[in-house]
Image: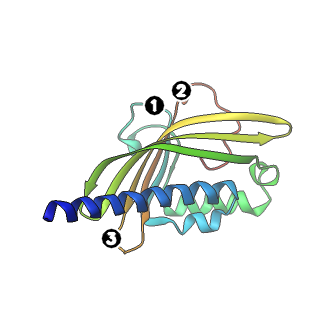
Amino acid sequence: MMDNRNTLFSQQTFAGAVELIWREAELLDRKDYREWLSLWDPAGFYVVPIDPQASDFAATLNYAYDDQDMREKRVQRMTSGYSASASDAARTVRTVARFTLTGDANDEVEVNSAQIVVAYKRGTSTLFAADLTHRISFASGEPRIVQKVIRLIDSTETLSAIGFLL
């Protein structure tokens, strides 16, 4: 009987994590960055590493390695109208799929997935493909992102037009 309860808990937790990831994608596509900030645990990190094998993000070079303060500053720049990425922001459509629960400990889960982002700006569509890892906490009763790692498949190449949140 206990196994069934644990399985049910894991299934509900996994479903809640996937729902949060889809919600995040929707908010980013709508450019609702303020609401996106509310999805985060205050101690969380948003990471876009350059090295596809990197695991010590604090000790390596990244496109982004944002704690709460840096996420808030990024959103401020993107919504102020004063930066080029804000005044001429790309329209985006995200597809997130291939969800796999890779870790389930206490009140936290880790979910791997794949993401395709189509960004449209000035008559040109650009495609971004990445493997995502979300670590999500349920400790507060509401799911919160503790860490999001976006591993772009072409991260070691010259990238342009990534002025929006992935």
Mark found first going from the N terminus, 1 or 3: 1
Q: Quadrant of the N terminus?
A: bottom left
Question: Disc 2 and disc 3: Cα gap in Å?
Answer: 36 Å
Say the numbered circle drawn on residue 18.
none
Badge 3 marks a residue whose secondary structure is loop
Question: Disc 1 and disc 3: Cα gap in Å?
Answer: 31 Å
Q: Label 2 neighbourhood size at 10 Å, few (<14), some (14-19), many (20+)?
A: few
Looking at the image, the residue that sits furthest to the top is 157
Q: Kindly indicate whether the residue at mark 1 contacts the one at mark 2 (C-beta within 8 angstroms).
A: yes
Question: Disc 2 and disc 1: Cα gap in Å?
Answer: 7 Å
Colour approach in the figure: rainbow
Residue 41 position in % (x across, y down): 43, 66
Q: Residue at horizontal 42%, vertical 62%?
A: 16
Left or right of 112? Residue 165 is right
Say the numbered circle drawn on residue 139.
3
Q: Is residue 162 above or below residue 2?
A: above
Residue, disc 1: 51
Residue 10 position in % (x across, y down): 29, 59
Mark found first going from the N terminus, 2 or 1: 1
Say the numbered circle drawn on residue 156.
2
Which mark is nearer the camera, 1 or 3?
Answer: 3
Q: Label 1 neighbourhood size at 10 Å, few (<14), some (14-19), many (20+)?
A: some
